[in-house]
Amino acid sequence: MSARLLLSALALASLTACGGINRHCQGEFEYQQAATLPAPEAIEGLRVPESPSALRIPPSPEQPVPFARESADPSKPGKMRTECLDVPPPLPPEPPENETPKS
């Protein structure tokens, strides 16, 4: 009996952990305050090879890019919802089987 109770409690805890309203893309985080280090300076007598396949770090954007945006919630008129940029947008509903999609 206690094993069932423990298993039920663990299942309930895991379900509630995923269902929270708090989004991970809202707010400021410590890593967002990280400063970019300057490029290494040339050292006399040392030649760093250039590779055509080397990955280049692009410059920082002039305006900060938000990790989330507020948009109107179609299921709740007059309400807003937070959309994180790392979460794909919801798919449109599928048409009923007896209808053909419009092209």
Image (cartoon, rainbow, N blue to C red):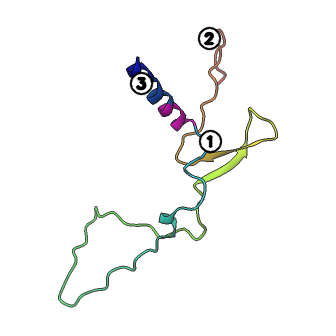
Q: Which residue is mark 3?
A: 7
Dot 2 amino acid type: Glu
Residue identified by numbered label 2: 97
The mark closer to the camera, 1 or 2, is: 1
In the image, farthest residue toward the left: 45
Answer left or right for 89 relative to 2: right
Quadrant in the picture for residue 79: top right
Q: Is residue 15 magenta?
A: yes
The residue that disc 1 covers is 21
Q: Secondary structure at mark 1?
A: loop
Sort mark 1 into few (<14), some (14-19) or many (20+) by Cα contacts within 10 Å: few
Q: Residue at x 46, y 74 (%)?
A: 35
Q: Is residue 25 above or below residue 64?
A: above
Classify mark 3: residues with Cα within 10 Å, few (<14), some (14-19) or many (20+). Answer: few
- Where is residue 84? Give x, y as percent: 58, 47
Quarter of the image for residue 92 reads top right
Task: Name the residue: 25% across, 72% down.
Answer: 50
